[in-house]
Image (cartoon, rainbow, N blue to C red):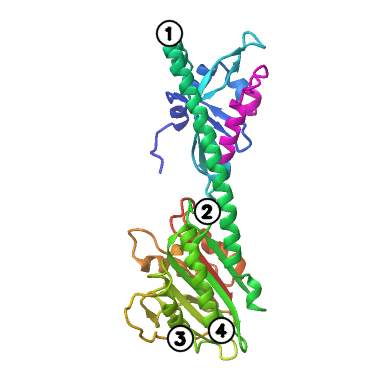
Amino acid sequence: MAEPGIDYAAVFQALPGMVALLTPEMVYADVNEEFLRMSGRTRELMVGRYLFDVFPDNPGDPAASGARNLRASLQRVLDTGERDAMALQRYDVESLERPGEWEERYWSPVNAPLLGPDGQVVLLVHRVEEVTELIKARGARGSRARVLEAELYTRARELQEGNERLRAAHAREREVALALQDAMLPALGDIGHHRAAVRYRPAVGYLNVCGDWYDLVDLPGDRIGVAVGDVVGHGLQAAGVMGLLRSALSAASRVADGPAQALEVLGLYARSVEGAENTTAVETCVDWDTHTITYSSAGHPPPALLHTDGTVEFLDRATDPPLGARPDHIARPQATTAFAEGDTLVLYTDGLIERRHEDIDTGLNRLADSLVRHRGTAPEPLADALLLDLLPTVGTTDDTALVIVQL
């Protein structure tokens, strides 16, 4: 919370470094006094104008790339919502006193996002360190200094080019990850005519794949199997283990005599899969003929059943340790609860409710409160509402899978 009495506009103007605020369209929203002084521009020449109209590349230098590199950096911040530090740039500036003449300038920019309540970038913070005098002073001290200056500039360009190659490799890896995700997670068509919604949110920085999964399968009669699970870890390795376990549980649920037996089979299989230790999962069987939900949990947070009267029931009467946690095979527990038409079943992974240094009951209560506030909402908008209510606006540190079924 901002302290009362602090004039943050005045603080911004008094900052000792060059700082500008840009809109997502890269138009100057504001600049501080130091930026005006060092750039030799007036506020009228900058605020409200497109950045690259104010500072274009030198048209007389075929190798000029400062504007192109800066535009790419700002676009990365817009796309990722993350800070981007640029290598040293030669970015010449046209003289206002002598139009058509360009002054040799060197800049070290850092660009950062300012995020709105919805997590979207609303402003770009563009900070520039002017190092022209330092570079020229190096050159004035003799040939050795000029060699060092040239070496510094060359190494900075090489670093920038290396970063661009790494970003391209990261983009290719992300494409592979997205294809892997699409192949591993089922489509909603798998549950027939019943209304449902699914959501999948990986932790920040993990290529949009994770070890969380969901599964929905048609079963004989007017029944469906719904499951979620959580493999320890993030990224491609956890996603690979997830794919194996999800497929195994999906197959087991089709032939097993109830959710408990399906998890028993999965537990035996998990012992042969490296990285599957301590995986949690919950399997449910929804039967519309008997209006019952049969369920079993392997160390997983309990599914929530939102009743039409506004009460929330957590299905926690059949919970056992995670997969592979016991050295010996022991039959898993199973329980059954009744539902009424119009109730809503919610399965999720721990990323939806758990927070560091917070008791799990606090997260469960937060989930229950959100469900009650949005009762009567269809699965698709309810899924969006739960994510908005329960996940951090930015910087999600845990994966989240969510399944909602209208009963």
Task: Look at mark 4 in the image and give the residue it sits on.
Answer: 254
Quadrant position of the N terminus in the picture: top left
**Three-letter amino acid code at the position of disc 3:** Gln
Q: How packed is label 1: few (under 14 Cα within 10 Å), some, or many (20 or more)?
A: few
Q: Which residues are magenta?
A: 47-76
* Residue shown at 54% from the left, 74% from the top: 247
Find residue 142 and name its label.
Answer: 1
Structural distance between the alpha carbons of marks 3 and 2 = 34 Å
**Three-letter amino acid code at the position of disc 4:** Arg
Structural distance between the alpha carbons of marks 3 and 1 = 81 Å
* Residue shown at 54% from the left, 36% from the top: 124
Tell me if 59 is positioned left or right of 324 in this view.
Answer: right
Task: Look at mark 2 in the image and give the residue it sits on.
Answer: 207
Q: Nearer the viewer, residue 216 or 123?
A: 216
Task: Look at mark 3 in the image and give the residue it sits on.
Answer: 261
Give the mark, 3 or 1, whose residue is nearer the N terminus.
1
Circle 3 — which element? helix
Give the mark, 1 or 2, whose residue is nearer the N terminus.
1
Between circles 3 and 1, the one closer to the viewer is 1
Answer whether labels 3 and 2 touch (C-beta < 8 Å): no
Structural distance between the alpha carbons of marks 1 and 2 = 49 Å
Residue 17 quadrant: top left
Between circles 4 and 1, the one closer to the viewer is 1
Give the mark, 4 or 2, whose residue is nearer the N terminus.
2
